[in-house]
Amino acid sequence: MLNKYARAFFTRVLTPFAALLIRIGVSPDAVTLVGTGGVVAGALIFYPLGEFFWGTVVITLFVFSDLVDGNMARQLGRSSRWGAFLDSTLDRVADSAIFGGLALWYAGRGDSLMLCGMAIFCLASGQVVSYTKARGEAIGLPVDVNGLVERAERLVVTLVACGLSGLHAFGVPGVEILLPIALWIVGIGSAVTLGQRVVTVRRESAEADAIARGGNSA
């Protein structure tokens, strides 16, 4: 749901910025690469040190590149399979860096193997959720399901919780509990979403197979 409505809103907001980048000669692929590099740097430099507020600020600044590059491609009339492939692939890299950075914090100074494991589970389950849709579409199925926690929800819940938890360093009490709660929400939600997609692919594949058998018998 967030992916549908938030993307439409921010696409409108960022359209002038995308047009400016086009005018100065920046390519959509360059925006994709720089945006991913910024997210990875923010996550793997700040999060393992427990600098959740500043890490989230850096990541948020760069994460919008995911909307800007697509907007630029549409304005240029250059939407392509390569652009879609690059964007999707680097999304996975950025997501891995965010949850990997959190796992490093909890494996070290954060001192919680349980939350380290939950961060790793969020990383892995998010990758598999994306893979199930991509694989289902690759075998010709629509995978027509809106999952409970898709990429937009995973990012918003995690980054908001990280940013607010980081306020603990500025003397705000009690906010540090928000990040563990967010990891559990994202982990459980991702598991539910994975189940939804697997069930959908199973149903759609059974329907496609039945239609194929019916066509062959005719």
Image: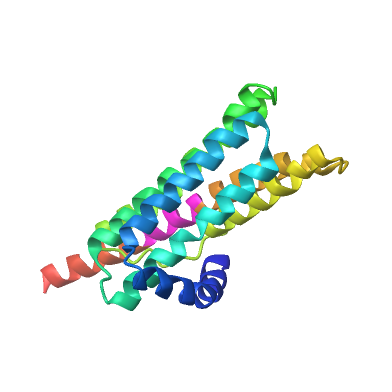
The answer to whether 131 is drawn above or below residue 77 in the figure is above
Relative side of 179 to 47, left or right: right
Quick one: which residue is furthest to the front in this view?
Answer: 24
Pick the front one: 147 or 112? 112
Q: Residue at x 24, y 63 (%)?
A: 81
Q: Residue 99: name its quadrant.
A: top right
Residue 126 seen: no
Percent position (x, y) of residue 43? 55, 40
Relative side of 28 to 184, left or right: left
Percent position (x, y) of residue 183? 65, 42
Q: Residue at x 50, y 65 (%)?
A: 146
Percent position (x, y) of residue 119? 59, 36
The answer to whether 93 is drawn above or below residue 67 in the figure is above
Q: Quadrant of the C terminus?
A: bottom left
Pick the front one: 29 or 83? 29
The answer to whether 202 is drawn above or below residue 123 in the figure is below
Q: Quadrant of the N terminus?
A: bottom right
Residue 119 seen: yes
Q: Which residues are magenta?
A: 194-203
Percent position (x, y) of residue 185? 66, 47
Looking at the picture, the colour scheme in use is: rainbow
Q: Residue 19: name its quadrant.
A: bottom left
197 in magenta: yes
| Principal secondary structure, stretch drawn in magenta | helix
187 in magenta: no
